[in-house]
Amino acid sequence: MEMTVETQKQGLAKLGVTDQRIAELKSKFGNMPAVAVGDTAGYKQLTSAIAEVRDDRVAVERRRKELVENAVKWQKLVNTEASRIKAELESIEEPLKANKKIIDDEKDRIREAAAQAERDRIKRIQDGIENFRSFLIEAATSDSQGIRQLIIDLERCDILKDRFQEFYDQALSVYQESLTKLNEMLAAKVNAEEVAKQQEAERVRLAEEQSRIAEQQRVEAEKLAAERKAFEDQQRAEQQRQAAIQAEIERQQAEERAKLKAEQDALDAAKREHEAKLKAEQDEKDRIAREAKQAEEKAAAEAERVRKIEELRQADLALQPDRAVIKGFLETTGGFVQTVSLETRSKLRNETMIAEFDVIVSAIKKTINQFGG
């Protein structure tokens, strides 16, 4: 139950300080003049006023805690009891709701079944109406005999009010429209077939006429071909006779040319043989002259080579005294270089300087060996 404003005020009054008490304290201390420093009597009144207001405030806070604690306990008690009562009520309510659901579900099933039955009924009626239109679709690809049979089949169809019920007017309209269009299609098809029959007869007549003309043209063509063949045979025989005459003339001319060519070839061969003999004689003379010149050049070259060798030998003989002097010097110097180089190398510490020193000593030794023989 929702608490009224009056009930709430009564509950708040339990805090111990009412609006009337607050108004009393405001009247008593709200306009209290400020106390100056040194005013002992005023200071006592100020302290007393604070104590009086504080006592009420502390009492309200203490009572608030008591009331809140009691309210929490009451809330827990109310919640517990409410849960118990709710569970009891639900144990009564749930079976009732389950029973109601069974009834509601069955009502929904019956209602849906009725709706489906109604949809099926309307579909059957519409299918029947659509069946009238299907005659037109089939007629579009049928001949006149087929359309006549479709008209008979359509006229046999039931067009009862009990069958089409509230769609009877629509069914009757579609039925009559389909029947009318079938008759129109039949008339158009009969006319088209008659035109086609006439066109076929005309086609056959034209084909026969064309065949007769073709046969006549064939006979004439064969006659012309025979005449052309006789003329061509005559022309071919004359051409063959002329060709034989021309072949004989060409044969005699060829024999004459062959005879003249043989005579010319013999003259050319004798000329080539004479020229070859002259050339061989000249080649032999040239060879003898070339070999004589080569022998002279070879003798001169050999004399020059001997002269140069002699010059070198004489120059070498002139240098022998000087070489003997140098050889003596080097033989004397060689032992000295060997001794000094070993002593000097032992004093070196840097690997790079030792390598350079070895190169110098090697060059000196090479020179000594060169002059020493």
Image: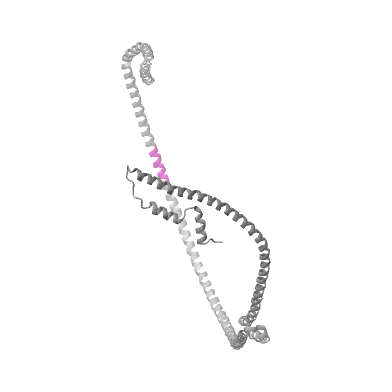
Q: Position of residue 46 (x, y in %)?
A: 38, 46
Residue in the foreground of this view, choosing between 292 and 193: 193
Q: How is the image coloured?
A: one colour
Q: Is residue 236 depicted above or below 154 in this figure? A: above
Is residue 258 among the parts visible in the rendering? yes
Q: Position of residue 306 (x, y in %)?
A: 35, 24
Residue 310 x, y percent position in the rendering:
34, 21
Q: Would you say residue 208 is visible in this rendering? A: no
User: Would you place residue 356 above or below residue 276 in this image?
Assistant: above
Task: Work out which quarter of the rendered image holds the C terminus and state it.
Answer: top left
Q: Is residue 269 magenta?
A: no
Say which quarter of the image contains residue 364.
top left
- Considering the whole magenta stretch, tell me its main secondary structure: helix
Region rendered in magenta:
276-287
- Quarter holding the N terminus is bottom right
Rendering quarter of residue 102: bottom right
- Residue at x-position 57% and y-position 80%: 226
Q: Residue at x 49, y 67 (%)?
A: 249
The residue lying toward the viewer, choosing from 229 and 347, is 347
Q: Position of residue 162 (x, y in %)?
A: 67, 85
Residue 335 placement: quadrant: top left
In depth, the one of 179 and 356 nearer the eye is 179
